[in-house]
Image (spheres, rainbow, N blue to C red):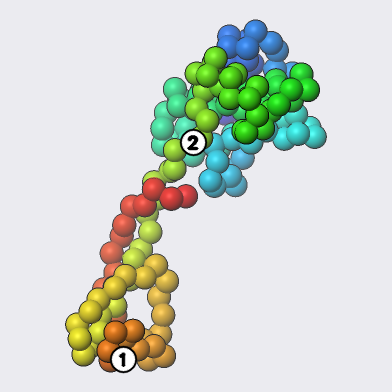
């Protein structure tokens, strides 16, 4: 999906579920990390995260569009457009839009360290110099025993 298709889908979803026109810009923002979309209060534009389209598909992406359009239409009507507002929660239910996005799974490397004395091992996301640190249990020297890829749900 490109920018013009996104704009077209946003306008169609707005007419279908809200019976109102979407008269501003809808754009992809690849820098969004922890959110599926963002409604901009000053410009009234909507930014969408293309990673959610890739990971969860078009149907879920339309749900995120509906969520952002709830912010959009309520803000323009000068009603409660924030997540905590009653107007917003009611409109979400009416159009069957998700209140929050699921986390995109991502791959991270976990480094395993083992104590040479007591044999206790632990995982860390960041590597560190084993000559500068000791075991927290017995005070023995540490060695790096390996690393492995792990999929995590946090973004």
Give the CA distance from mark 1 to mark 2.
Answer: 44 Å
- Against 138, residue 19 (above or below) is above
Which residue is labeled 1 in the image? Answer: 139
Q: Residue 21 carries which label?
A: none
Q: Which residue is drawn at 60% across and 47% down?
A: 31
Which sits earlier in the primary sequence, circle 1 or circle 2?
2
Q: Which residue is drawn at 42% across and 71% down?
A: 126
Q: Which residue is drawn at 61% across and 40% down?
A: 29
Closer-to-camera residue (84/130): 84
Percent position (x, y) of residue 102?
Answer: 44, 38
* Crowd rating for badge 1 (residues with CA inside 10 Å; few <14, some 14–19, many 20+): few
- Against 135, residue 125 (above or below) is above
Q: Residue 101 carries which label?
A: 2
Q: Residue at x 39, y 67 (%)?
A: 125
Depth check, mark 1 against mark 2: the one in front is: 1
Name the side, left or right, on which 81 lies relative to 114.
right
- Against 29, residue 89 (above or below) is above
Residue 14 falls in image quadrant: top right
Percent position (x, y) of residue 35?
Answer: 55, 41
Closer-to-camera residue (29/76): 76
- Against 119, residue 91 (above or below) is above
Query: Mark 1 near mark 2, Cβ–Cβ under 8 Å?
Result: no
Percent position (x, y) of residue 43?
Answer: 78, 32
Percent position (x, y) of residue 101?
Answer: 49, 36
Q: Is mark 2 on a helix, strand or loop?
A: loop
Name the side, left or right, on which 70 lies relative to 60.
right
Q: Is residue 6 visible?
A: no
């Amino acid at each position: 999906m490109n920018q013009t298709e996104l704009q077209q889908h946003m306008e169609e979803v707005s007419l279908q579920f809200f019976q109102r026109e979407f008269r501003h810009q809808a754009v992809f923002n690849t820098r969004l990390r922890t959110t599926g979309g963002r409604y901009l209060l000053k410009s009234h534009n909507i930014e969408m995260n293309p990673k959610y389209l890739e990971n969860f598909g078009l149907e879920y992406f339309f749900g995120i569009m509906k969520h952002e359009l709830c912010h959009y239409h309520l803000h323009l009507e000068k009603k409660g457009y924030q997540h905590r507002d009653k107007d917003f929660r009611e409109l979400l239910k009416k159009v069957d839009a998700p209140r929050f996005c699921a986390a995109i799974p991502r791959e991270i490397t976990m480094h395993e360290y083992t104590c040479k004395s007591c044999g206790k091992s632990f995982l860390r996301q960041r590597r560190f110099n084993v000559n500068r640190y000791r075991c927290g249990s017995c005070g023995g020297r540490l060695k790096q025993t390996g690393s492995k890829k792990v999929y995590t749900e946090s973004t």
